[in-house]
Image (spheres, helix red, strand yellow):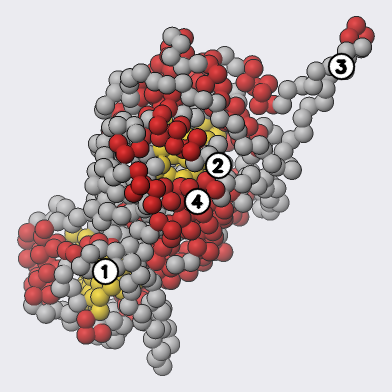
Amino acid sequence: MPIRRLPRPTLSNPAGSLWILGVFLSACSGATAGPVQDVSPVQDRPIASAESAPASAPETPTPTTASVSAAPTLPWPERMLDEMTVREKIAQMIMPFVLGTFAPEGSDAHDRIVDIIEEEGIGGVIMSVGAPTDVAVKLNDLQRHSKYPLLVGADLETGAGFRFWGALHVPTNIALGGATMFPSAMAFGATGDPGYAYQMGRVTALEARAMGVHLPFAPVLDVNSNPENPIINIRSFGEDPDAVAAMGVSFVRGLQEHGVVATGKHFPGHGDTEVDSHLALPIIRVQRERMDSVELVPFRAAIDAGMRGMMSAHIAVPGLGGGFLPSTLSVEVLNDLLRTELGFNGIVFTDAMDMSAVNRLYPRGEASVMAVLAGADVILMPPNVRQTIETILGAVADGRIAEARIDQSVIRLLRLKEEMGLREEREVPLEGVPQIVGIPEHTEIAREVAEHSITLLRNKRDLLPLLGTRTARVMSVTFRSRTDVFASRYFDARLRETYPRLVTTRVDDDTNGEVYQDLRRRARASNLVVVSVYSNFAGRVEIPDETLEFVNLLADENITHVVVSFGNPYLISDFPDAQSYLVAWSSAPVSQRAAAEALFGGIEVAGRSPTGMPGYFEIGDGIHLPLKVSDLGR
């Protein structure tokens, strides 16, 4: 599937003024050693864009050579490759991490990345959190400092808002907005409608390109078959391989038909693990037959649909022939399986090479050498850019890596840059950002997905929908990570519209016993307790014992209560006697509002779980609640 070149938008309000604030985030890593095999050349997918730039005209023959036909000028990618030194070629394969925060010229934050671009000649960057206009301004600046056009990637698994939304002005408690934030991938699975995945891809692509991002590192194609998975979980579309494939293919088409490269992850499948690869190396101990019937199904479907990018996983799968070597560093996985057997001829990105699953296992730089030998085209987020380039350069000088192997990757990258129009125009018009990013047309789609995803897994005594008595004594208790400043913000605001006397409390890992003692006292005096659990932060699947004891006390003492999971659906096993258990699948503002409306019957509840947990619920489970009709309306 060729990437569709989109015309530059006609923009109004060129003098529009904006002010933004940025945010923060962290990274990942990798490495590996040992003897390696030659990687056979892989034929690139032809560029099939009718809007690609025309080739330069052939040179006019001189009188002395008039009788000999002049050789045509090489296409731009081949010409650039011929002009590069080996070191420059290697640098094209490196993509370090960059924050999207405001960084004025002369500041350390600005000069640090500019120095890397100018001195090392990197081929691209992965942009992390920031406000949309700050991101666009920074990327335009970085493009101007680069000798060759930069490819820009970003983790946009649930829309551009996955990285470019969430700034809060703390003194005033004002949310500063941003790009469109969709619910989690598993929420899409709960809707059962792949059309929504296509729309998320479309919106994500349009907003990404408006900010200068070309590579949304999405979709997640992992099949979450393990409820204890601490790092994939709700990032997956679900547990059924065919359903995940259908959602993934629709997402891919939405992305690539609107101007960006879809990048499936995490190959060959990160769904059946209980270890976070940011912290250690997960080992998936299943046979090849199981991989074929589960993990590889969505990846195969996306490749057949024309997906142009793939991100490797820092996991070991001995059943695929690579022993206990991380897949990112395995010839058997990246070359023999991905390229040769599955026929993938796009660009292979490593997962972040600063993740402990590889970074702690191999000497600095060695893992990147092994990744190149295994078949990776791009080394993502190496711990040290210069050291990585020098180590790979040394491997070429020693004959360990053939220069032709480097050329294979670099020509793929250069052809993609030309195909995406970066040869002609690297920068984006800043006035286009507020005309495309986070507009109501896009956020309305996110709202619709959130409402259609809400899933009710338990409803004893038909507790839901709630009566909504305004004089009721209602307490809302929120468990969250201390850094999640938006947890319950929108949910509680909607509850307070119905319950003006609402009492709210937030608890986290550090909450002491006195707070829980007070909660128990107030719960006994309440007509209703609503417990919301925000468990969608990476690396976590469980909540503290004190929180569990509080919720279970509500059941033991028959205090009317509802538990809402804004993330991990498997937490139902921690609340075996909860009176009502509702899953909203994510903490996105649209999901918080949808969950609150669902409690009152303000929306139809029709979500079906795309995953299961033996003894608690199965794939397809979900209690239907019709829209509540009353004299007061919605």
Q: Residue furthest front?
A: 289
Sequence order check: which comes first, mark 3 or mark 4? 3
The residue tagged 4 is 301
Q: Nearer the viewer, residue 471 or 634?
A: 634
From mark 1 to mark 4, how far is it between C-alphas? 28 Å
Sequence order check: which comes first, mark 2 or mark 3? 3
Q: What's the residue type where badge 4 is placed?
A: Ala
From mark 3 to mark 4, how far is it between C-alphas? 46 Å
Give the image location of residue 486, x and y in percent.
33, 58
Q: What's the residue type where badge 3 is placed?
A: Ser
Contact between labelled residues 1 and 3, with CB atoms less than 8 Å apart: no
Among the 4 quarters of the image, the one containing residue 26: top left
Q: Residue furthest top?
A: 64
Q: What's the residue type where badge 1 is placed?
A: Phe
Q: Nearer the viewer, mark 3 or mark 4?
A: 4
The residue tagged 3 is 69
The residue tagged 1 is 617
> 10 Å neighbourhood of mark 4: few (<14), some, or many (≥20)?
some
Sequence order check: which comes first, mark 1 or mark 4? 4
Give the image location of residue 422, x and y in percent.
64, 35
- Relative horizontal placement of residue 439, taking residue 566 as reference (left or right): right
